[in-house]
Amino acid sequence: MSETDRTRHTIALIGGTGPEGKGLATRFAIAGHKVIIGSRDPARGIEAATDLNQQLSALAEVDITGDTNENAVSIANIAVVTVPYGGHQATLESLKFMLVDKIVIDAVVPVYFEKGPRPIDVPAGSATEEAAAILPDSKVAGAFHNLSAEILLDPDADLDADVLITGSGVAKEVAIQLASDIKGARAVDSGPLRYSRFVEGITILLIGINSRYKTHTGVTVSGLEQ
Amino acid sequence: MSETDRTRHTIALIGGTGPEGKGLATRFAIAGHKVIIGSRDPARGIEAATDLNQQLSALAEVDITGDTNENAVSIANIAVVTVPYGGHQATLESLKFMLVDKIVIDAVVPVYFEKGPRPIDVPAGSATEEAAAILPDSKVAGAFHNLSAEILLDPDADLDADVLITGSGVAKEVAIQLASDIKGARAVDSGPLRYSRFVEGITILLIGINSRYKTHTGVTVSGLEQ
């Protein structure tokens, strides 16, 4: 990360102890951001942070700590939401006042498994729209839904995938910047929050394709010149 | 098309006079299939066929005719559905008995436009699932939703996009074959019909991206080795 043209952010991963949260933590930390892995149970956040520090310390100077979701959010300027969908609503409601005026990037996919991945019906239309409804005083964007956790977790791996970003304003701009911090990722402005349902749905397709083709896939928009 | 390993099909494009129908007709005809462009108004089907024949005759020996949807379906072994969603249910119900035992590949996206593309709520979950419900005695797959009509209409253009195919059995196999007939297209087995909603949704995303980036996009699944 060039010190001149990039901002060093403090990023809380809300519910960040799973593969997607740890994978994003890996890439954000390597890009030079301060990362806090939040969890309901602070011991799990600390364990995940210790694990990543051990893996990454030989590669780069990383700053990854673990804490409660509340503490993580309180010192961060950006929160990335990676809780399982089952905890999405309750977690965001509990953090609502701490997230006022902050940037919240939702990466949650409403999915359950019953003979393959299936969508959970979200009354708001998508997890990201639900987040925006719960957090009217935060700046909410959707991003990072379609990235393979396995590839994110390998700090040297080239992602070769697009990050489809929904939202507007500063939240979108920051999501675009964070996406460009990930090797092999390209940010694609995918429109307002109401398109989040389609981005989230792609993950369900990809989970099925991964299982069918025995690989880790992502999605790329062809025909874009950038 | 090699005569030894490819089957020459007779393909009816139901509601095939729009850009997507004419685009697919272009590619299927160049691949050597007999193509009939169906329309409620046979004069419009004939007009579209005449138009394509004039454009393509210098490039390849193509066999494209126009007719009513009923006549087109009656002589075809494969029907590809490209009606606007508004006519989807009524059109398929009217052709139901003629489509018994035939392969039906649905390419319809339930979308309307109001400050950008928006999804039409389909009680069956997707246009393709709706087709399967209306046509219990046909072999239904979903495919070709995400291909740019503009690129399909240029017979020399490389599509550089995946064809996400939903369904099973012979309908899926034929959709895979037809996809591979399109230059630059790759078929991706995207699972059972219940995943069609996500494939259809991608088109809505792409329409928005096309408008935002002023280009014609498609979608590619990265990380597949084939």
Image: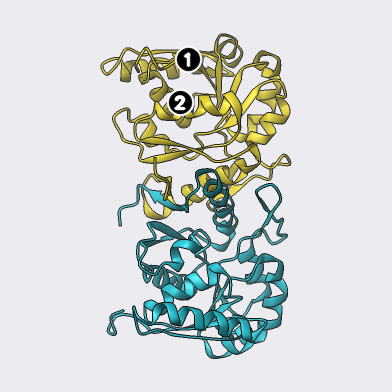
Chain colours: A cyan, B yellow
Q: Residues within 10 Å of mark 2 (few under 14, many from 20)?
A: many
In what quadrant of the picture does the C terminus of chain B appear?
A: top left
Q: Where residue B222 appears, x then y in whole percent?
A: 41, 50
- Say if B95 sits above or below A190 in the image: above
Q: Is residue A75 left or right of residue B22?
A: right
> For residue B178, which numbered disc appears in the image?
2
Label 1, secondary structure: give it.
loop
Residue B124 in sight in this render: yes
- Say if A91 sits above or below B79 in the image: below
Q: Chain of mark 2?
A: B
Which residue is denoted by mark 1 in the rendering? B9
Q: Are marks 2 and 1 on the same chain?
A: yes
Which circle's residue, 2 or 1, is located before the other in the chain?
1
Dot 1 amino acid type: His
Q: Nearer the viewer, residue A62 or B187?
A: A62
Q: Are marks 2 and 1 in contact (CB under 8 Å)?
A: yes
Q: Where residue B44 appears, x then y in whole percent?
A: 50, 18
> For residue B177, which numbered disc appears in the image?
none
In what quadrant of the picture does the N terminus of chain B appear?
A: top left
Residue A78 in sight in this render: no
Q: Nearer the viewer, residue A217 or A146?
A: A217
Q: Is residue A39 left or right of residue A86?
A: left
Q: CA distance from mark 2 to mark 1?
A: 9 Å
Q: Is residue B184 left or right of residue A68?
A: left
